[in-house]
């Protein structure tokens, strides 16, 4: 399928001169919300690091398991920041399977991701419980105002904030400083007591040597062609949770986080060892 066939009228503001992180990730997951420039970059990456496709799928499955587990803990509200393109099961679809009263707001600053999320919600969502907005995670207070304006989220009830494979993409300010961790600290302040933070992040700590070399190549490719990225250590990722208490089993590789929550219909992803998944993930609860 060429670009014209899949989306002859791309949303306003779409940058088709550079590959987009969200659209390339959609390509890895087998989606169609991507353009030739995204596919060319994705294919180049996969030619060097073919393991990245199952890594992306495993990360997506962590999102599904985290949402299921949180629903079982009583969570009914989800704010999915950097939600990307609705490929391979989106948050509201997973939550609705267990809790038809669940509420979800999707946020991204990629026009294609927001447009496709809106189309999905128009076709299969409930405007009283689901919304998609274009906002920038680097401005937490403004983003939070937009979330409240949807009327979907009740700030008096616990919220699950999802930042899945987001913060390893650098969030530069006007001076080029990555403000992702500082922005997340503000989001933690904004969340009501009893809320949760679900987070996943690529790490180069504790991965097999041959994979560590591929991560060096991967970073170089993203830094020069798409968006700058950063691989944090386990400790640095742990700091992103602040004083939130990690729920069992703590932070771990995506494939090891509550595997019992995997859907029977989920694709099978196999790694020689769990650390080949390269994504460190966990869920923390606000006191």
Image (cartoon, helix red, strand yellow):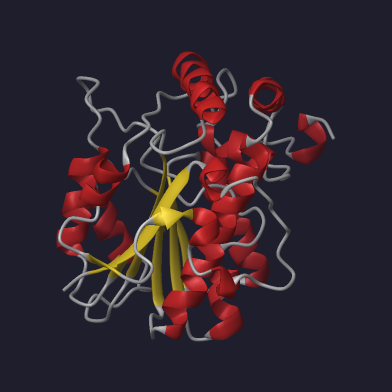
> Is residue 217 shown left or right of residue 10?
left
Check the picture and name the quadrant holding the N terminus.
top right
202 is higher (above) or lower (below) than 121? above
Can residue 163 be seen here? The reply is: no
Observer-nearest of 12 and 162 = 162
Observer-nearest of 121 and 48 = 48
123 is higher (above) or lower (below) than 203? below
Residue displayed at 58% across by 74% down? 260
40 is higher (above) or lower (below) than 87? above
Horizontal and vertical percent for residue 279? 47, 45
Can residue 228 be seen here? The reply is: yes
Horizontal and vertical percent for residue 53? 66, 39
48 is higher (above) or lower (below) than 111? above
Check the picture and name the quadrant holding the C terminus.
bottom left
Residue displayed at 59% across by 52% down? 58
Residue displayed at 55% across by 45% down? 277
Give the number of callouts.
0
Observer-nearest of 148 and 233 = 233
Residue displayed at 26% across by 39% down? 180
Horizontal and vertical percent for residue 212? 49, 27
Q: Tell me the quarter of the picture where residue 286 sits.
A: bottom left
> Is residue 167 shown left or right of residue 123?
left
Horizontal and vertical percent for residue 192? 19, 73
């Amino acid at each position: 399928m060429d670009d014209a066939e899949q989306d002859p009228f791309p949303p306003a503001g779409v940058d088709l001169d550079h590959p987009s992180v969200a659209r390339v990730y959609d390509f890895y997951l087998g989606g169609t919300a991507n353009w030739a420039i995204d596919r060319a970059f994705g294919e180049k990456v996969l030619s060097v690091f073919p393991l990245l496709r199952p890594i992306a799928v495993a990360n997506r499955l962590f999102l599904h398991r985290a949402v299921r587990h949180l629903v079982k803990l009583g969570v009914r509200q989800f704010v999915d920041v950097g939600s990307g393109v609705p490929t391979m099961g989106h948050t509201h679809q997973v939550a609705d399977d267990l809790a038809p009263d669940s509420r979800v707001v999707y946020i991204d600053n990629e026009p294609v991701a927001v447009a496709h999320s809106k189309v999905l919600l128009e076709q299969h969502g409930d405007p009283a419980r689901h919304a998609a907005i274009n906002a920038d995670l680097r401005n937490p207070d403004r983003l939070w105002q937009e979330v409240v304006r949807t009327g979907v989220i009740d700030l008096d009830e616990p919220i699950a904030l999802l930042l899945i494979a987001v913060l390893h993409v650098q969030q530069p300010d006007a001076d080029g400083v990555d403000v992702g961790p500082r922005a997340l600290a503000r989001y933690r302040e904004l969340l009501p007591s009893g809320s949760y933070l679900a987070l996943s992040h690529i790490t180069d700590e504790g991965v097999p040597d041959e994979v560590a070399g591929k991560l060096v190549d991967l970073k170089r490719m993203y830094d020069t062609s798409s968006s700058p990225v950063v691989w944090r250590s386990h400790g640095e990722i742990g700091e992103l949770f602040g004083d939130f208490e990690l729920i069992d089993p703590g932070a771990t590789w995506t494939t090891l986080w509550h595997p019992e929550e995997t859907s029977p219909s989920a694709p099978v992803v196999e790694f020689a060892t769990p650390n080949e998944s390269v994504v460190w993930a966990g869920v923390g609860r606000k006191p």
